[in-house]
Image (cartoon, rainbow, N blue to C red):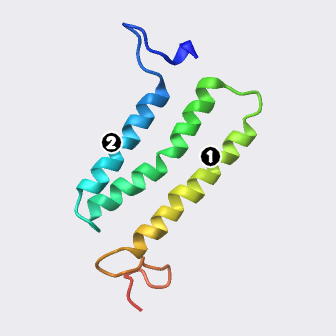
């Protein structure tokens, strides 16, 4: 446990930076106008940031069995990333929905 405690002259552990960035993103999200594009971007970036964090942990710690970690990464992309895109598009103030492949402009 002593490895995670920074000593004078040492840097903070990576998880502290990641947690701090996510907390800042959460604060910025609530400071932005509700339903704005900027708020949507912050929301999506925070959701997609999970996957690179897991990949960085795999690279840094080099577990013997990486398969489960890659599966977790794929699940994070699907669950947090793509689900957030779908949710954000549903909250779009201009159209109320995302464009579909059959209707690229969002109109029917």
Determine whether the residue tagged by mark 2 lies in a helix, strand or loop.
Answer: helix
Q: Quadrant of the C terminus?
A: bottom left
For the point 54% across and 45% down, which residue is it?
A: 51
Please determine whether, in this image, residue 55 is positioned above or below residue 46: above
Tag 1–tag 2 contact (CB < 8 Å): no
28 horizontally vs 103: left or right: left
Q: Which residue is mark 2?
A: 24
Where is residue 74? Give x, y as percent.
63, 51
- Of residues 86 and 4, the one nearer the viewer is 4
Q: Spot the residue most to the top.
A: 8
Where is residue 16? Give x, y as percent.
44, 29
Q: CA distance from mark 1 to mark 2?
A: 23 Å
Please determine whether, in this image, residue 30 is positioned above or below residue 57: below
Res 62 label: none
Q: Residues within 10 Å of mark 2 (few under 14, many from 20)?
A: few
Q: Quadrant of the N terminus?
A: top right
For the point 27% across and 59% down, which residue is it?
A: 38
Please determine whether, in this image, residue 64 is positioned above or below residue 42: above
- Of residues 99 and 38, the one nearer the viewer is 38
Determine whether the residue tagged by mark 1 lies in a helix, strand or loop.
Answer: helix
For the point 41% across and 72% down, which residue is it?
A: 89
For the point 49% across and 30% down, which residue is it?
A: 15
Question: Which quadrant would residue 6 be assigned to in this image?
Answer: top left
Q: Which residue is mark 1?
A: 73
């Amino acid at each position: 446990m002593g490895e995670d405690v920074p000593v004078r002259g040492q840097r903070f552990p990576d998880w502290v930076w990641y947690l701090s960035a996510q907390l800042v993103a959460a604060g910025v999200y609530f400071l932005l106008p509700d339903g704005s594009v900027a708020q949507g971007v912050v929301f999506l970036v925070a959701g997609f940031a999970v996957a690179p964090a897991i990949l960085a942990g795999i690279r840094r710690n080099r577990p013997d069995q990486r398969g489960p970690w890659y599966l977790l990464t794929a699940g994070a992309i699907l669950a947090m990333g793509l689900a957030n895109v779908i949710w954000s598009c549903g909250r779009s103030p201009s159209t109320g929905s995302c464009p579909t492949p059959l209707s690229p402009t969002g109109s029917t």
